[in-house]
Image (spheres, grey):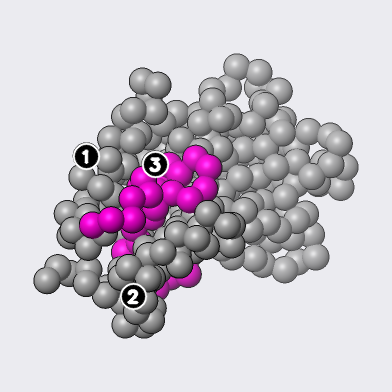
Amino acid sequence: MSQYDHIHFAAASGEPAQAALADLIDRYGQVPRYAADVIVALGGDGFMLQCLHEGTGLPVYGMNRGTVGFLMNDYVPSDLPERLAAAEEAMINPLSMKAETEDGVLHEALAINEVSLLRAGPQAAKLRISINGKVRMEALICDGAIVSTPAGSTAYNFSAHGPILPIGSDVLALTGIASFRPRRWQGAILPSSALVRFDVLESGKRPVMADADSRSVKPVKWVEIRSEPEIAHHILFDPGHGLEERLMREQFA
């Protein structure tokens, strides 16, 4: 017996994921989530994030029935118990976001990949950036900004020309999206203990939305972001295909 003998299968709503769900339950049975040792998630990266956000504390082994599948393993229905027993585990600490909207309501959310601020109108956003209570940039004029974890650094952050961060590194990436002023600003790498605050300037004509792993609030007055070391998500990967190896491959692709 292994530590992952009791499997709960969960699937996205798409046909490939649902077909895989039926096949795997037929092969291995289905254990209720409360009695499971592990969750096997069938879908894409978005569905993997959804499973992790549900906060069961169980490790999640993903099999790709979506598009990119950076956080997923290949879909191979045979020998699943053996693969689970041999899997490598990666631990991820999420970001916490606090944001106050223009109506004075405080919103809180967790993000495994990134928290992003995005302009919500025709004009560029204007953001003041503070780190640990000290103003570091009086005004960033941009389409938005991203604070990313190492696990999320190959996603939206990388598309915005941010750095890929080694998994397990105690740093966060702060990356501007289409930065206009300062024109040459290349972003920053911050310690994971940093408290990042964005204040939205001229919010009346430059509205901004905040997004934590696709959960959005708008229009925001300010946003604070920090890592949450007390919360840990556990993802399982086939041997030799863990997050560290995937991040390394992305840098030489």
The one nearer the camera, 25 or 128, is 25
Mark 1 neighbour class, 10 Å CA radius: few under 14, some 14 to 19, many 20 or more: few
- Say which amino acid is labelled 2: Gly
Which sits earlier in the primary sequence, circle 1 or circle 3?
3
In the rendered structure, the answer to whether residue 67 lies left or right of residue 172 reads right
Which sits earlier in the primary sequence, circle 3 or circle 2?
2
Range covered by the magenta-colored residues = 50-79
Q: Position of residue 146 (x, y in %)?
A: 57, 40
The one nearer the camera, 83 or 124, is 83
Contact between labelled residues 3 and 1, with CB atoms less than 8 Å apart: no
In the rendered structure, the answer to whether residue 253 lies left or right of residue 243 reads right
On screen, residue 56 above or below 93: below
- Principal secondary structure, stretch drawn in magenta: loop
Mark 3 secondary-structure assignment: loop
In the rendered structure, the answer to whether residue 174 lies left or right of residue 117 reads left
The residue under the point 39% across, 28% down is 250
The one nearer the camera, 108 or 128, is 108
Q: Which mark is residue 150?
A: 3
Quadrant for residue 69, please give it: top left
- Residue at mark 3 to residue at mark 2: CA–CA distance: 35 Å
The residue under the point 50% across, 60% down is 19
Nearest-to-viewer mark from 1 and 2? 2
Is residue 77 within the magenta segment?
yes
- Residue at mark 1 to residue at mark 3: CA–CA distance: 18 Å
Can you identify the residue that label 2 sits on? 29
Q: Which mark is residue 240?
A: 1
Mark 2 neighbour class, 10 Å CA radius: few under 14, some 14 to 19, many 20 or more: few
- Say which amino acid is labelled 1: Gly
